[in-house]
Image (cartoon, helix red, strand yellow):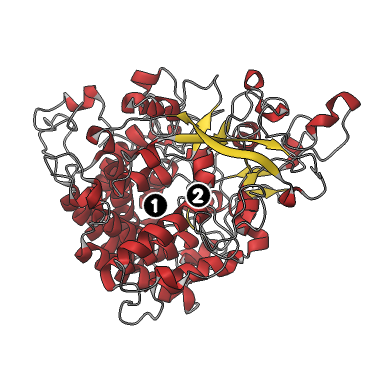
Amino acid sequence: MKSRKYTTAFLGLCILLSVGIWVSCKEYLDKTKQSSISEDQAFKNFDNFQGFVEELYSGIPDFSNAYWTNSWNWGDDEVTSSDMNYQVVNYFDNENMWGWQTEHNGWDTSWMDQGDGHTGGGHFQVELWSDGWYAIRKADLGLDNINKMDGTQEEKDLIKGQLLFFRAWYYFQFMQYFGGLPYLTKPLPADAQFDQKRLNYQATADSAAKDFRKAADLLPIDWDNTSVGKRTAGNNALRINKIMALGYLGKDLLWAGSPLMKHESSDKDYDPSNTHDYDKAYCKKAADVFAELLNLVESGQANYSLVPFDKYQSLFTTIGQNWKIPGGTEAIFRGPYYGAWNSAYNTAKQYQPGVIQDKANFYPTANYVDNFGMKNGLPITDPNSGYDPQHPWRNRDPRFYKDFIYDGEKVIQGNLSASNENLRYASLYTGGTYRDPHTGGSSTGFLLYKFIPKNFNKFDVGYGWSSNLNIHLPWMRLGGVYIMYAEAAAEGYGINGHPSGYSKTPVDAINMIRDRAGVGHVHSKFTSSLNNGPKNFIDNVVRREWAVELAYEKHRFTNLRRWLLLTDPEYANKTGAFFDRANTFDPNNPRDNMVLNYKEKPIVKRKYIKRDYWLPFKTKDVNISASFKQNPGY
């Protein structure tokens, strides 16, 4: 075993992780003459072993702050300005799925690959690919030495539960992008020849599910209620617990039951008619797990709850709260936070047009905005929804106003010179100042507002260090669990069914999310067990709820792939909204402003094929062994 240097005690690490400050592990990894210790010493007791486990936390990428300007929404949800051709989303828009790798894109901007960085490399260098494989081996090494630990049963369970969770979590992250993998449960000797064959997706998911299940059974709901956790009571929020393990167990099983994964081994092109062909057995098991989790939450045994709608932005952003990490009671799984200044000078500045901010920008596509229906709960395409294309901002789902800046909305809050007064209100109509392509203007007619405060622009200067801003997106939150439960239960138990011991139907779960936002309940036309039953409900309700409630939180690309929708032109093309302002424009009442000639036009056309449902492995990694095969078509 290579020597380890422990840089901090367990008590200090608990506090640092709980408040979201990144703990560097470079020194922990580096061997020094003074720090060499034996395996027996490393795994001797709980404090030593927990020091070994800590590094697995610091390998979780902060996908929203992986570079000064980086992308993480790769579906049909956003486009970039013209000067952002080095972003992964641009490579994917050009049907070049190799672009996630630094070897092909030439930049270290992707949270998936920072050029073989590692957990101690710095604030921008934590990435999924090399850190994930490193973490899997580290988890295997820990599990292989668990019996060397001298401690109470509680201490052993806490260590083992964390190791099992992390092994499964990193595998799950890889699986959803690359498909089935070898599932290693023993650390390979450094001089061993790697000769492991890939399992299919469902077999790999089964192995991860076993780890997640064991972790859930070993870990507490709340570390504060353990003897060990009492030492750091109130500062254990980011520690892996039973709810996190159950959440990912359910997600792992739902993904395994999804259409892409069910048809992974098909030699034929993926058939669009299979977009609703779920594996019901996996979905039923997923629904059971989500029901177990939700019972713990709703009974008050777990300290999680939906954040009130008037605090919605606090899920992703905190300002002036002493660097408090966002998420509140709804965030289930978050990684360490690398530094608030990254938010101010990275995430907060990349969704504003160049005339009020920088030119490095991302903009919501008009086709994605169309997922946001009306306040009555109906989609804008429904003839009874009340949608009026001449008043497209009126009576929309309240989440529309939380997520987007639309034409005519006030953006600049403070004083402006007379020459810049025309910038105060978003001029997103065709030819408007906010759409000037020479300044990185919006090509789509919308700006993102979900986690970027309006005053984060060069006139209000709300992005400085003194703003005390944090932007940090959770990997999993309770709102998403309700939606995953609705999808899994609809397939596993039917629209009006539910697992034993949990009373909410899939419709109830969706309505709970809508109640929080003040949106009308699911219409009866989508809740009948007739008319294709689950297919109708999932297609018209669940998938739209995924798009609306969890917009821009890194889920869309994965969802389109697992639903076998990536190659469908409806989801492959990206559009912009083009319209004129009416002469009755009123800056004090933007929601009711009238527009003329509203239409959408494609601005990006993607022609994906079956190969593109899975990303290509790095060539140098595939070449390690003849048994490890590259994904088909690459």
Q: Earlier in the sequence, mark 1 or mark 2?
A: 2
Residue 217 in view here: no
What residue type is disc 1 on?
Gln
Residue 291, quarter of the rendered image: bottom left
Residue 418 location, x and y as percent?
90, 27
Residue assigned mark 1: 50
Q: Report crowding for label 1: few under 14, some 14 to 19, many 20 or more residues within 10 A (C-alpha).
A: many
578 or 154: nearer the eye?
Answer: 578
Residue 575 location, x and y as percent?
50, 35
Residue 73 location, x and y as percent?
46, 39
Mark identifier at residue 13: 2
In this image, 390 relative to 168: left or right? Answer: right
In this image, 577 relative to 165: left or right? Answer: right
What residue type is disc 2 on?
Leu
Is label 1 in a helix, a strand or a loop?
A: helix
Q: Are marks 1 and 2 in contact (CB under 8 Å)?
A: yes
